[in-house]
Amino acid sequence: MMKILSTVGLSPAHRRILETALEGEEFIDRPCRSQAEMIAAADGGCDVLFSFRVPDELMRRAPNLKWVQLLSAGADHILKGALAAAPGVAVTTASGIHGTAIAEYTIGSMLAYAHGFHQTIRAQIRGEWQRNTNFMNTVDSLRGTTLGVIGYGSIGRETARLGAAFGMTVLALKRNPAEHADHGWNAPGVGDPEGRIPAQWFGPDERAALLAASDYVTVTLPGTAHTQGFIGARELAAMRPHAYLVNIGRGSVIDQNALAAALAEKRIAGAGLDVFEREPLEPESPLWAMENVILTPHMSGAYKNYNGAACELFAENLRRWRARRPLLNLVDRALGY
């Protein structure tokens, strides 16, 4: 019998989702709000862990741990320390459950910028009736523009689907552009699993060409050694002066100082930023006060049924684990995602 430990604290409805896949396995669900609580919950060990984080001491308390199912799309925050030294422990992510929420956030950020909401909200706070020719001449439509998607995974594909519905031409960049299909977890009807939407595909070394051809750019790359500083001063210089960039991947993917300089000097028109090199974003950062920046505190993936969707994915992986079938969203440790 397997011992499965959840440190999440699930509702009765979420537990019922998992019970369809447990089939008599021992299941412990203990809400943990600190590392100390997680470590205490792991006393006696476990075979499977359902959690956001994996403290080193928990690994020592659970020497028989075989598999970690994360509730996050990224794994960069746990692929170090004791877990990095345990290559035999399978790690799967919750990639796919964020697709709809983050794609809607991304398109929402682009719409807000195109229609000047970032300016009209500030005018509302000041009590100004901002209806003049200069402002109205800046308002635009997404239709007929080009959307560059850097990182064509589940989030990038759903963003592409929504962008195409708005009449945008989609360009896609991925590690292997010859492989168009996506084999990760996706909700039915979401994304672009066959890779049919992009008008053109680009590889990592062609990122400047994609940036130069795009009016809007979304960056959905994970944080890995391969993506560190993926977009720097050279790449930003390739962008169009009217282009708008959204980063919902990881702050380490973009050189933040180079981005701030490009925004301040109006070499690119604007940015929607949900992730940063250091979080929380330091109070002295110039990004806070920039009127061409829409800034949020790493929350683009949040939505009401987050845990429910994570449990649906975990339940499917539990069924696969028991049947010795390949797990969904299995992390390739060499790649970091």
Image (cartoon, rainbow, N blue to C red):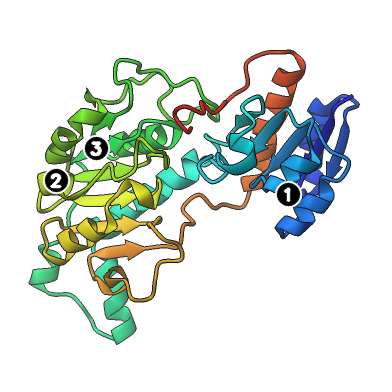
Q: Residue at horizontal 9%, vertical 53%?
A: 241
User: Would residue 53 be found to the left or right of residue 189 on screen?
Assistant: right
Q: Residue 87, can we see it?
A: yes
Residue highlighted by disc 3: 148
Q: Residue at horizontal 54%, vertical 46%?
A: 77
Q: Residue furthest bottom?
A: 127
Q: CA distance from mark 2 to mark 3?
A: 17 Å
Q: Which mark is residue 234?
A: 2
- Crowding at dot 3, Cα within 10 Å, few <14 / some 14-19 / many 20+, comes out as many
Mark 3, secondary structure of its residue: strand
Q: Reading the chain from its start, which is encountered first: label 1 or label 2?
A: 1
Which amino acid, mark 1?
Val
Above/below status of 306 relative to 204: below
Q: Position of residue 254 (x, y in %)?
A: 29, 49
Above/below status of 77 relative to 69: below
Q: How many marks?
A: 3
Which amino acid, mark 3?
Gly
Q: Please name which of the two marks, 2 or 3, marks the residue nearer to the observer.
A: 2
Q: Residue furthest top?
A: 324
Q: Residue 31, can we see it?
A: no
Q: Which mark is residue 8?
A: 1
Q: Position of residue 257 (x, y in %)?
A: 24, 60
User: Would residue 334 be found to the left or right of residue 306 on screen?
Assistant: left
Which amino acid, mark 2?
Arg
Q: CA distance from mark 1 to mark 3?
A: 36 Å
Q: Position of residue 31 (x, y in %)?
A: 78, 54
Q: Residue at horizontal 22%, vertical 62%?
A: 260
User: Would residue 241 be found to the left or right of residue 13 on screen?
Assistant: left
Q: Please name which of the two marks, 1 or 3, marks the residue nearer to the observer.
A: 1
